[in-house]
Each structure stands twice: as C-alpha cells, then as structure tokens.
Image: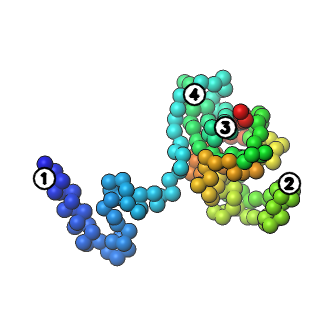
Amino acid sequence: MIRFFAAPIAAIALLSATAGGALAEEFDSRDIMGGGPNFFRSGANPIPRTTVMYNGNYAPGTIVVNTSERRLYLVLQNGQALRYGIGVGRDGFRWGGVHRITAKKEWPDWTPPSQMLARRPDLPRHMKGGIDNPLGARAMYLGSTLYRIHGSNEPETIGQAVSSGCFRMTNDDVSDLYSRVGVGTTVVVLNN
C-alpha cells in the first residue's frame, strides 16, 4: 500500500523542487487532488452547461428560457435539451413571450436604450465591442424588443436576477449557443 502512494508523492516533490520560478509559485500539490488556491482559477462557469432530458412540446432547435429556474434550454432531438445557466431580469424587469432571433453579432457594440439611460445617466452613451463590453462575446437580438441573449464579463451574475430584462450567459456558453442557432430561431420566454 505504501508503494502505491510513494511514487506520486515522489513525483510531486521532484516537480516542486525542480520547477522554475513562476511555476514553483503557481504550483500547489493540492491542485492535483481537487483543492488548493488554483482550483477555481480557470474561471469555470458557476452553472455548467449540460445535456438533460426535456419534456416539452417544442420543436428541436427552439430556445426555451425559464426565468424562474434561471436556465435556458436549447431543445434537441429525442426528448433532450442543452441546459445553460443564465442571469435574468431583476424584479420588475422579467417578461415572457415568444420571439425570434432577428440578428446575431460577435463582440457587439452596446448602446444603452433611452429607458436605461433615464435610470442610469452615468452609463456611457455607446461602447465598442470587446472584453469590457457588458454584452460580452456574442449577442442574439430578440425580435423588436430591447432584449438580447448575450455574453457577460461578470460570470458571477449567472444564476442571479440582476439585468434589465436581457438574458446573460458566460462568454463560453453564449459562444456555444451562438454557434448552434441561426437568425429565425424561435425563443420562448417563460415567466412563471
């Protein structure tokens, strides 16, 4: 039994002793076992994307947003769906209905609507797309509404009710969804 643990411990000790400056500072043997200070450094999604069984009367390819669950479902074949964690509108900003994706943009610019500027006059009037932009890596525009499904540079808000009505996803998740759907995709927003 001791031999079983001796080799991995020796390897960790050797790696620690021979690692260069930056690597030695970054390395913590607890990271290998699922702990330590670098375990969450990857910026992992707080609500991982997963394939689930889905019982709904929606055609494959439909997006279903469930605001009370704070989840977005992309309906697949065979009674399954891809489930994503999302951020939703805070109290007074949640809504429901059926729309279609009317436009898709990569690293979109952001121009806050007049209603938002009235509430928050401190916001910029326009912001070029990029990593600091609140719309994140991708945006899918929903019909004639002011709302979008978009990325976020604040992954900690996923699973929360903090937006002005848009649906936030991590940049990784919104990029994945963006690659799977097209303009014209039906989006059903359930606000239970």
Q: Which residue is mark 1?
A: 2
Q: Secondary structure at mark 4?
A: loop
Sequence-earlier tag: 2 or 1: 1
- Tell me if residue 110 comes above or below residue 24 in the rendering: above
Which comes sooner in the sequence, label 4 or label 3? Answer: 4
Earlier-in-chain disc, 4 versus 1 = 1
Location of mark 2 (residue): 115
Q: Residue at x 61, y 31 (%)?
A: 75
State how far apart marks 4 and 3 are (Cα). Answer: 16 Å
Would you name the residue on which mark 3 appears?
Answer: 68
- Which residue is disc 4 drawn over? 54
Res. 167 in view:
no
User: Contact (CB < 8 A) between labels 2 and 1?
Assistant: no
Compute the Cα span from label 2 to label 4. 36 Å
Label 4: few (<14), some or many (≥20) within 10 Å? Answer: some
Q: Position of residue 2 (x, y in %)?
A: 13, 52
Q: Residues within 10 Å of mark 2 (few under 14, many from 20)?
A: few
Residue closest to the eye, 163 or 98: 163
In the rendered structure, which disc, 2 or 4, sits on the residue that comes first in sequence?
Answer: 4
Dot 3 or dot 1: first in sequence order is 1
Type of the residue with mark 4:
Tyr
Q: Residue at x 25, y 72 (%)?
A: 18
SS of the residue under disc 3: loop
Q: Residue furthest bottom?
A: 21
